Image (cartoon, rainbow, N blue to C red):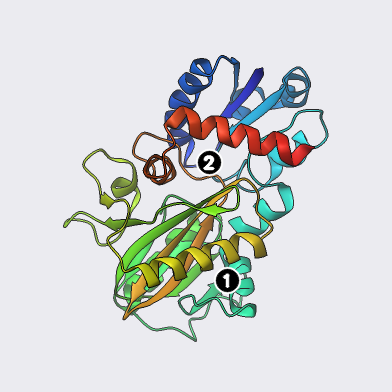
Amino acid sequence: MRVLLIAGGWSDEREVSLSGAKGIHNALLELGHEVDLLDPAQDFSNLMARANKADFAFINLHGSPGEDGLIQAMLNRTSCPYQGSGPESSFLTLNKAATKTIFDANSILSPKWELICAAEGCNGIEKLTPPVFIKPNSGGSSLGMTFAQNAQDMQSGIEKVFSMGDSALVEEYIKGIEVTCAILGDEPLPLILITPPDKAQFFDYNSKYALDGAEEVCPAPIEEKLTDKIKEITLKAHTLLGLSGYSRADFIISNGEPYILEVNTLPGMTPTSLVPRAAKAAGYSFSKLIEKLIELGLSRQK
């Protein structure tokens, strides 16, 4: 097949996208496909024309465009199928506050939260007190995140997010261990236990992508009953959000209870990324994982 590999883009996660695209490109060649690389930041105007010449599009974008559903919406106007979720569910899931609203409405346990907007009269802190995490409401890879331990930290963390042009999600700090669970098709993959390096306060950008970053153990050494519960919650969230193909949910486990943090619709695909690691534990080589995602994308179109 002729595969249009879409990577790069204009978000703060551009370099992560391009890094992951190298491995995907090699895997596609290994599978016998012809690859055409498109960077929306350099050739956005020709996206639809080039998609119409392709048999399949593989999207490896993070943030906007990609995780916000824009590229998927444009591809839906062409004859080209693609892997992963469609535009509506992608847009919904990228917005952390919208996702948490759905979790709350469906009895999925998540840390307490509030949305702080930059509009005049909307940025007062009322519900939560430190320690808290402050995140861009629509960002990823832990970019712009602050672990605020006092009121001054909160103010500077919120201002940092505002300077990025986003609203701030303030989230209750829950002490515990972090795990992640991916869905491939409609099956949960083995859990991964994540232990950030001692120098990191949390699973930050460097911990996620540096070769000397967090320690990741897969399958996670967690009792079977709790593992099954986390897999069940992950699949429930995947279904409620209308996701397709694959996704990855992050959790904090505290006192035996799993709290879901967020869901990723286009998980990272670098050599150190979590979904390829979980897929490997389930018996998928990297190229087989790419092949499976293409199969799922083609199946959805049919």
Q: Position of residue 100 (x, y in %)?
A: 57, 71
Left of 193 or right of it: where is 157?
right
Q: Is residue 259 above or below residue 77?
A: below
Residue 211, quarter of the rendered image: top left
10 Å crowding of disc 1: few (<14), some (14-19), many (20+):
many
Residue 283, quarter of the rendered image: top left
Q: Which residue is mark 1?
A: 100
Left of 87 or right of it: where is 66?
left
Q: Which residue is mark 2?
A: 11
- At horizontal 72% and vertical 25% (from top left) the residue drawn is 47
Q: Residue furthest left?
A: 198
Q: Position of residue 79 (x, y in %)?
A: 81, 28
Q: Is residue 73 above or below residue 176?
A: above
Q: Is residue 216 above or below residue 108?
A: above
Q: Quadrant of the N terminus?
A: top right
Q: Position of residue 208 (x, y in %)?
A: 34, 47
Q: Nearer the N terminus, badge 2 or badge 1?
A: 2
Q: Secondary structure at mark 2?
A: loop
Q: Nearer the viewer, residue 212 or 127?
A: 212
Q: Quadrant of the C terminus?
A: top right
Q: Is residue 245 above or below residue 92?
A: above
- At horizontal 77% and vertical 38% (from top left) the residue drawn is 301
Q: CA distance from mark 2 to mark 1?
A: 23 Å
Left of 93 or right of it: where is 301?
right
Q: Nearer the viewer, residue 208 or 117?
A: 208
Q: Nearer the viewer, residue 139 or 228?
A: 228
Q: Disc 1 marks which amino acid?
A: Lys
Q: Position of residue 140 (x, y in %)?
A: 48, 51
